[in-house]
Amino acid sequence: MDPQRHDFYLMLHLPPAVAQVVGRLQRQLNTSYHGPSKPMALDRLHATLVPLGSYQHRIPPEVLRLARSAGALLEEAPFPVCFDTLQSRGPQREVGTVELAGHGAGVRPLVLLRRQLVAALLKVGWPAEWIRPGFTPHITVDYQHKPVSARRIEPLVWEVVEFLLVDSHYGKGYHEVLGRWPLRNRQPSLFD
């Protein structure tokens, strides 16, 4: 038996009502399409903020401790986010992912939240070389689909009220929540 891979990351989970809208988009995407498709389960739809690595067997306790310490440092108010484009990622001649993307002010709060999370990780001693430098806010809708032309959709807008620390049990379709931090109006918002 292969050892279980654990993908570890900080992320936003989509509210159920927004996930239902994405489910309708998934069905529309595949209405007249008969090629390969692997839609993301609605209860696992998310936007990754900071990937924290992949581990075999289990996440090392020290790594988990650092990530939880960093998450606990943030004190931010809830904020709105908006995704308004359906597009493919990667080479446009191969099967790949289809995702939701946002632009400008719609996803700027996610970029700022990620910056805060990265600063918190560095503050608690997370190695800088373990942090991916780039960040493109997106929500994967399908993992295995022929490319689609980028198109605007009815904007998906919701209030972000928490972020999560998750152990994704790779290949099992299971996200184990290891930390949850609500966003509260404790101080003036960074996003105003």
Image: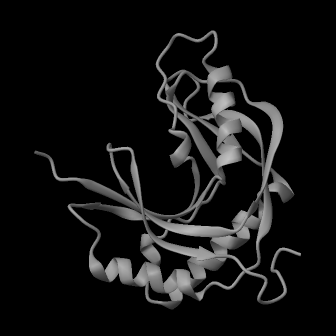
Q: In which image quadrant can residue 160 be found?
A: bottom right
Seen as rendered, the residue at the extreme right is 192
Q: Where does residue 58 sit, x and y in percent of width and height?
A: 24, 65
| Horizontal relation, residue 177 to residue 145: left or right | left
In the image, is residue 84 above or below residue 181? above
In the image, is residue 170 above or below residue 153? below
Q: Where does residue 115 sit, x and y in percent of width and height?
A: 65, 74
Instruction: Tally the marks.
Output: 0
Q: In which image quadrant can residue 154 be found?
A: top right
Q: Nearer the viewer, residue 1 or 138?
A: 1
- Residue 127 visible here: no
What residue is rendered at 73% in x and 30% in y? 150
What residue is rendered at 50% in x and 13% in y? 35
Q: In which image quadrant can residue 32 be found?
A: top right
Q: Nearer the viewer, residue 128 or 48?
A: 48
| Horizontal relation, residue 94 to residue 190: left or right | left
What residue is rendered at 55% in x and 30% in y? 91
Q: How are the residues colored?
A: one colour
Seen as rendered, the residue at the extreme front is 17
Quarter of the image with the C terminus is bottom right
Q: Where does residue 107 sit, x and y in percent of width and height?
A: 77, 57
What residue is rendered at 68% in x and 29% in y? 24
- Residue 53 visible here: yes
Quarter of the image with the N terminus is top left
Q: Nearer the viewer, residue 88 or 77?
A: 77
| Horizontal relation, residue 98 to residue 183: left or right | left
